[in-house]
């Protein structure tokens, strides 16, 4: 760590810190439950570790370790708004739901890879890239995939999706959706697409795949993360092009370029 790094960390308003160890490869996903008592970490070592601050001793060890899908990296973790369940997204085509203590409750159906129209498949047909629980609905989740689609699911029915969303493209083809997120009201969805675009949809009566907002060439390489601010006025996007961009959802964008190494890990 150089002096500049020290100055950057000095801006973080922290009074105490601990280091949670256990994974053997890159930590790729983090999720703190809404009560702040439990933390999930996911890794390229294919595992999830569950930490309980209230029951933790001085060894700071996880109380449970899971391997959701053998041989697949953990890519995203997200708690339900009621903290009783969490969503796990790996590099497989099927997202899984667990209860608060790590018991598997089920996995969503996989689609038929031989059906050309993605809207006619029952589920994703290629590896997942991201996923989030709707912050205002305990029964709705969002997933994105390398198959070029986003999907909304009802957690009460693992065999049926609610909606399939195909991003806007210049010509008919399959381009991966590399990241996705809800706004904090659960009324808007944003996606980073493999063509470098950022696309946003507002959930309303009669809405479909046509995005309300479409920014071409928002990044020059894969968009590895998108996130709304709490008030929904600012959208952050990070990319393998070594930038983090801060912009208004209306996309009359004032972009803040942060120089540095390619950004791929969890934040």
Image (cartoon, rainbow, N blue to C red):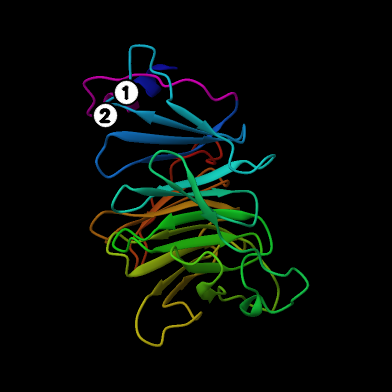
Q: Residue at 54%, 41% (x, y): give it.
A: 264
Residue 57, placed above or below residue 81? above
Q: Identify which residue is drawn at 33% across, 48% down.
A: 84
**Label 2 crowd bin: few (<14), some (14–19), many (20+), radius 10 Å:** few
Rendered view: 236 above or below 173: above
Taking depth in this image into account, of 90 and 85 the one nearest to the observer is 85
Q: Is residue 251 visible?
A: no
Q: Main secondary structure of the magenta part?
A: loop
Q: Is residue 59 left or right of residue 113?
A: left
Q: Which mark is residue 11?
A: 2
| Residue linked to disc 1 | 7
Coordinates of residue 152 in the picture (x, y in percent): 48, 69
- The magenta span reads 7-24
Instruction: Give x and y (percent) for residue 132.
Output: 43, 55
At 25% across and 54% down in the image, what residue appears?
230
Determine crowd level at label 1: few under 14, some 14-19, many 20+ residues with C-alpha closer than 10 A: few
Q: Above or below — where is 244 with respect to 38? A: below
Q: Are marks 1 and 2 in contact (CB under 8 Å)?
A: yes
Which residue is pictured at 26% across the width and 26% down the height?
54
**Measured Cα–Cα span from mark 1 to mark 2:** 7 Å
State the residue lying farthest toward the bottom: 206
Q: Relative to residue 267, is residue 16 drawn left or right?
A: left
* 64 within the magenta span: no
Tally of numbered tags: 2
SS of the residue at dot 2? Answer: loop
């Amino acid at each position: 760590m150089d002096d500049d790094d020290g100055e950057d960390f000095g801006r973080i308003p922290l009074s105490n810190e601990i280091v949670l160890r256990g994974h053997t490869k890159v930590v790729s996903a983090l999720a703190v439950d809404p009560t702040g008592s439990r933390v999930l970490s996911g890794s390229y070592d294919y595992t999830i570790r569950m930490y309980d601050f209230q029951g933790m001793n001085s060894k700071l060890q996880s109380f449970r370790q899971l391997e959701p899908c053998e041989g697949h990296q953990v890519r995203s973790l997200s708690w339900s708004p009621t903290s009783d369940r969490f969503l796990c997204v790996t590099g497989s085509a099927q997202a899984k739901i667990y209860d608060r203590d790590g018991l598997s409750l089920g996995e969503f159906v996989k689609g038929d890879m031989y059906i050309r129209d993605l809207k006619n498949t029952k589920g994703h047909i290629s590896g997942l890239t991201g996923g989030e629980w709707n912050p205002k609905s305990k029964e709705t989740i969002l997933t994105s995939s390398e198959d070029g689609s986003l999907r909304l699911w009802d957690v009460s029915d693992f065999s049926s999706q609610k909606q399939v969303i195909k991003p806007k493209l210049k010509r008919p083809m399959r381009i991966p959706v590399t990241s996705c997120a809800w706004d904090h009201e659960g009324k808007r969805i944003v996606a980073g697409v493999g063509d470098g675009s950022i696309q946003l949809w507002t959930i309303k009566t009669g809405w479909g795949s046509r995005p309300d907002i479409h920014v071409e060439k928002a990044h020059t390489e894969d968009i590895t993360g998108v996130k709304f601010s709490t008030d929904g006025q600012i959208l952050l996007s990070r990319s393998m092009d070594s930038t983090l961009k801060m912009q208004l959802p209306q996309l009359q964008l004032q972009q803040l370029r942060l120089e540095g190494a390619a950004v791929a890990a969890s934040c």
